[in-house]
Amino acid sequence: MTPSAVETLRPSIGVGSGVRRILAPSYSDLMFIAMIVWLFVLGEDAWSRLLVDGDTGWHIRVGEYILDGKGIPKTDFFSLTKFGQTWYAWEWGADVIYAWLYRAWGLKGIVLLSGAQIALFAVLLARFMVWRGANPLLAVALTLLAAGAGSLHYLARPHLFTLAMLPGAIWVIERDRRRPDWAIWTLIPLTAIWTNLHGGFMALIACVGLLVVAEAIERNWGGVIRYGLLGAGCGLATLANPYGYHLHEHVIAYLQSDWIKDVVEEFQSPRFRSENLMQFEALLLLGVMAAAASAWKRNWAHCLWILFWAHQSLVSVRHATVFVSVATPVIAVELTALWRQWATGASKKSVLGIFDSLAADMAPNFRWTSLWPVGFLAALLFVDVGSKWPGDFPTLRFPVKTINAHAAKLRGQRVFTTDEWADYLLYRFYPDQRVFFDGRSDFYGPSVGKEYIRLTGGGHDWKQLMTKHDFRVALLPPDVAIATLLKTDRDWRIVADDGKAIVFERVAGFPKTPATALMESVPSDELPKGDLAVNGRRVPTHSGEKRWN
């Protein structure tokens, strides 16, 4: 293409009229579409990879409970072990959204929302970096690195609301630091909404608090007052939830629980073995250097944000995406400064000069949003474009075929199974099903959790525990210790074994325990208004690692 042709085309794809901005896709629009295609449209297990965590199933059922007019749950109605006890469905807003999408479009609606949230996270990071003056080529490269690092949390769960909302909130704060205006106060109602979607709202509170400290270090007392008021407003907004301050007590106890830290992998330190954690490691090293550069420039907010969240993510890998959100824009600006020093004086015909010119041309084309992303999502939702939409949870992760074949034997029974398969049983059979232990590890606590671990591990008292809880059926992977023990126990017999899941049935002749008789006497339509609890388990990886130690 000749230079004159490029100049003719540039107005139509650059900063054009309002109509052109609506109809012509920007680079950020194309990135949004490309991220969804790359991650979820291509590949055999494309959209299904978002459903490898069974928590999605009980989130749907909690949302349906609320949509059916039963209120926001305050007690448990899913378990055999803590039935009717206080439980906080602190992600009830996300649950309602999932349930509504599920009723309208099935699992397709939920995974499409999740894919859009992930793509939005990437686009917000890229646009934020360009807004701050970063080289667009560097911004795109760092966005891809950040997207890779964050992929350990790419699951259809409420934490994706935090993934998408945090970069936008940080952008609003940075915009206000550059030129204060009224927009900063929109974070207060945003926090109220966020609080009812996911517990990640506390990341915003922490960032605002660190900003106040930074303003005090810099002796900017006007900033201390302004952002102190913002933090107070956001803090008060978090009380706008069905549980009031009890939610905060629960979240703090949850984050400080030694039990959770010991057994849930996402609350443990990262293991730098997988590709996504190696990408996180690269950003971590760059982030520490960017923090040092920020301290040299006396930009203490950036320094504190990076160091605080670097520490948090090294203690608990679940914070890695928060670190990426706050550190990547700072890294981009520092690398851009180095780029400019390197590119100064370079010939326009040199490779460096060509890339520098290309980056300058790209920057304006990141700064608007057209109708293309909306149209693309609508096409995926309403038009059959060949995407492999999930009709159920992935069979490589869940015993879907076994449960289909033996639904009559499993439905409504006292089934011992893994916590993740228990999530799936709730998805399939609630309200007829209650489970011994599911993904809500914070709710069950160490008393039930340790019994669960001893059972799955074939502990010395496994048989007494099976009798204590009056299990009638067991649904287990063949590689867990208790499955081997049940194969040789005279009180149990194998009903089905397809190599991926084994169904055991207890031999007849055992009387019902008082607990069983009580639970079976409660009609399903008289269950207490309860709710489900927090996302309390590690993010499963695709490597097949065990979630429990």
Image: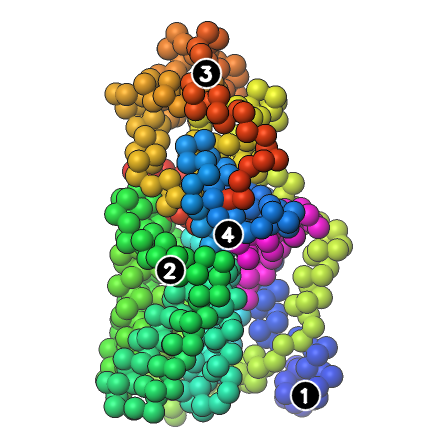
Query: Which quarter shows the C terminus?
Result: top left
Name, please, the residue furthest toward the right: 383
Cβ–Cβ under 8 Å for marks 3 and 4 = no
Quarter of the image for residue 117 reads bottom right
Instruction: From this view, report whether residue 531 is shown above or below residue 207.
Output: above
Given residues 232 and 478, the one toward you in this image is: 232
Task: Identify the mark nearer the N-term, 3 or 2.
Answer: 2
Q: What's the residue type where badge 2 is placed?
A: His
Cα separation, mark 1 vs mark 2, equals 48 Å
According to the picture, the residue beneath numbered tag 3 turns out to be 512
Q: Residue at x 35, y 31 (%)?
A: 452
According to the picture, the residue beneath numbered tag 4 turns out to be 157
Quarter of the image for residue 228 reads bottom left
Task: Identify the mark nearer the N-term, 1 or 2.
Answer: 1
**Label for residue 248?**
2
Which is closer to the viewer, label 1 or label 4?
Answer: 4
Region in magenta? 92-121
Label 4 element class: loop
Does the magenta run of residues contain 119? yes
Q: What's the residue type where badge 1 is placed?
A: Gly
Q: What's the residue type where badge 4 is placed?
A: Arg
Cα separation, mark 4 vs mark 2, equals 20 Å
Q: What's the residue type where badge 3 is placed?
A: Lys
Task: Identify the mark nearer the N-term, 4 or 2.
Answer: 4
Label 2 element class: helix
Q: Viewed as shown, does residue 427 lie left or right of 540?
A: right
Which is closer to the viewer, label 3 or label 1?
Answer: 3
Give the image location of residue 160, x and y in percent.
50, 58
Q: Viewed as shown, does residue 221 lie left or right of 191?
A: left
Does the magenta run of residues contain 547? no
Give the image location of residue 260, x and y in percent.
31, 46
Residue 494 seen in the figure: yes
